[in-house]
Image (cartoon, rainbow, N blue to C red):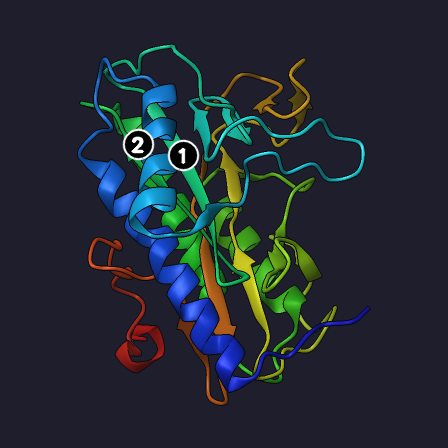
Amino acid sequence: MTITLKTGADIEGMRIAGRLASEVLDMLTEHVKPGVSTEQLDKLAHDHIVNVQGAIPAPLNYAPPGYTPYPKSICTSINHQVCHGIPNDRPLKNGDIVNIDVTVIKDGWHGDTSRMFIVGEGSIAAKRLCAITFDAMWKGIAKVKPGVRLGDIGHAIQTFAENQGFSIVREFCGHGIGRKFHEEPQVLHYGRPGTLEELKAGMIFTIEPMINAGKREIREMGDGWTIVTKDRSLSAQWEHTVLVTETGYEILTQSAGTPPPPAFITDAKAVSA
């Protein structure tokens, strides 16, 4: 396994790409409401990335081996959709939850982040799932520093989510990122402490747990991309791109509208760019 350690110049490029990705979500926030289709959100995002940011939407025509090219510029996964939902003309309804996943390429660097949105008035159960998933992501991020192992991150996320009565999707994981959309290492959201690769300063990867209200089993829809829960239970996901620093971590996907860390994150230095 070859894990690329980023240089100072590389990190600066990744900070810019990460901020731009987060700013797309800032821009979309006011548009996520009942009656708006995910196709409309996709067009807004595409036009902003290309025309305002001078960047490239990484998902558009992305085609890993065995996949047909992805047809849109963002991923929108609604309710029981786990990930890789393709934007379409179905209007969002009051009470829907939707994950919007944005990856931009700027000057060759990839910035990758996602947030959950509750459309109109969400149920107590939906709000709790989204909140616990956000906290689970941060439980993983809080572990990041040189010398820690990837299994420590996965274990922190898994134990927190399962103690809340939720389940972790295991077929998809976080990933290294840089000049390529997906690089080594794979970042599992479950695992055993003290296992897998050791973190070193200069590593950049995503932490993006997918957490189900019901069972963890999933299936792929006929479009070849959209993943759903087998039991049709709600699923939520949050994602940040994270840099391992000499003393801890830095969130690279930050902007003015980024939701602040939860109260249990007390090291303010670690989360400021």
Residue at numbered disc 1: 99
Q: How far apart are marks 2 and 1 (CA)?
A: 16 Å
Quarter of the rendering occupied by the N terminus? bottom right
Residue at numbered disc 2: 44
| Residue reaching furthest to the bottom | 246
Q: Is residue 142 visible?
A: no
Helix, strand or loop for disc 2: helix
| Circle count | 2
Q: Which amino acid does label 2 sit on?
A: Leu
In the image, residue 121 above or below residue 27:
above
Mark 2 surroundings within 10 Å by alpha-carbon count, few (fewer than 14), some (14 through 19), many (20 or more): some
Mark 1 surroundings within 10 Å by alpha-carbon count, few (fewer than 14), some (14 through 19), many (20 or more): many
| Residue reaching furthest to the top | 90
Q: Residue at x 69, y 39 (%)?
A: 171
Helix, strand or loop for disc 1: strand
Q: Is residue 23 visible?
A: yes
Residue 39 falls in image quadrant: top left
Residue 6, given in percent of the width and then of the height, sits at: 59, 78
Q: What residue type is labelled 1?
A: Asn
In the image, residue 50 above or below residue 196:
above
Q: Which residue is drawn at 63% across and 78% down?
A: 199
Q: Which residue is drawn at 55% across and 31% down?
A: 84
Residue 87, given in percent of the width and then of the height, sits at: 45, 22
